[in-house]
Amino acid sequence: MAIEFAGSPGPTLGIEIELQLIDPDTRDLMSQSIGLLERCRKQGVEGVKAEITQSMVEVEAGICRDVKECRWLLEKRIAQLRSAALDMGVELCAAGTHPFQRWTDRRIFPSERYRYLLEKFQWLARRLTVYGLHVHVGVESGEKAIAISNSAIRYLPHLLALSASSPYWEGADTGLQSCRVGVMESFPISGLPYYFLNWQEFERYCDTLLQVRAIASLKDLYWFIRPNPAYGTLEFRICDAMPSLSETLAVIALIQALVVWIDEGFRSGARSKVIPMRRYWIAPENQWIAARDGLEGVIIINEDGARRKISEDISDLIERVTPVARRLNSYEELLYLKHMIRRGTSAARQRAVFREKKNLGAVVDSVVKEFKADLLVPTAGDRANEAVGISLQ
């Protein structure tokens, strides 16, 4: 079966952020997405969609040229969405998990797609109360999407470590920085993708699964990185949702620059499209280290087993992709990653709040506070100044 890949002329961006609907009084999740979506429809708020439970919505930025356009669109839509939510007594925030909600209290959103997921996956679908960031980057062809995906596997732990924001699950400290990825990996076709030699092999794989009815469509491939033929993109799905929009945009800038940097390596001959299988074999271990330890993790950096602190490897990666980011008009956002490394993950900040307050409601308050405060930051230039230690006052 031939799968047509729409193709994109340049590395355009498409963003999807899953947001939590919070009760300001109890700090628990609220099942209010049906009413909120209807209010958004009446008020003309665009780019807001349902998700699998009624305690979450997705806000998206369509096809954007660069990260700055993403910020403009996301700030506008989140502000409109939050205004509509506050009118209903609902607060918003973003993090990989809610610290104390019970998945048994959640209601599935009534749609054909989610009824299908519930029937197929049962308990797995019911407990899917996790929140992620999905980043689409336009690529020219399916062949390039596969080749770039194969190389980008090496850097997925870096993205996970930067975004890790899900240390708690149903009131318990999981000991992980991101427990969200563990929830996602419980699905049959999820986690890291298989190694495909080329687009034709990917087509054969998909054809096999469709023929035996293991999947109904390519939407059922829940990998942490996957080609999206309909959009002509490579979709990165490993990141937790992050409380701060500035952090989110910094990670988006890294992902876009990474895709272009890898592709330019292919074009120049500096990078081979053939990936040593030993690198693939160690990828799950590095992902686990990032999920458990975040930016403090020590990952395997080559097939001989040499190890390095992931924050140091991220710092080197920032330097490598900086020339690309400058051309993509995203250097200021990329620079913010250095601030993130110094500050630590959202997961670490959430734990610090709990150590001080001994209250998971206070953890929710801290995540909401970060989400609200960052929307008030006026310019990318101010964020870059903060990243290098220049006062914003």
Image (tube, helix red, strand yellow):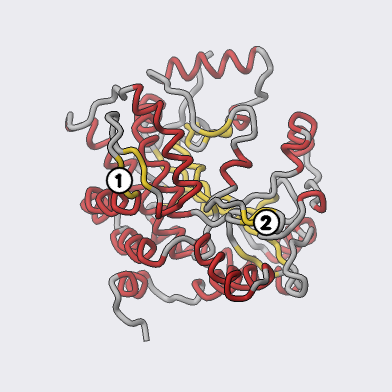
> Left or right: 271 with respect to 356?
left
Quarter-of-image position of residue 299: top left
Which numbered marker is on residue 172? 2
Contact? badges 1 and 2 (CB < 8 Å): no
Q: Which residue occupies 55% across, 19% down? A: 206
Which numbered marker is on residue 120? none
First along the sequence among labels 1 and 2 = 2
Q: Is mark 1 on a helix, strand or loop?
A: strand
Quarter-of-image position of residue 118: top right
- The amino acid type of the residue labelled 1 equals Arg
**Residue 37 rendering spot, x and y as whole percentages:** 73, 58
> Left or right: 107 with respect to 169?
right
Q: Which residue occupies 76% across, 50% down? A: 103
> Left or right: 170 with respect to 237?
right
**Residue 195 rendering spot, x and y as whole percentages:** 42, 22
- Does the rendering let one see residue 135? yes
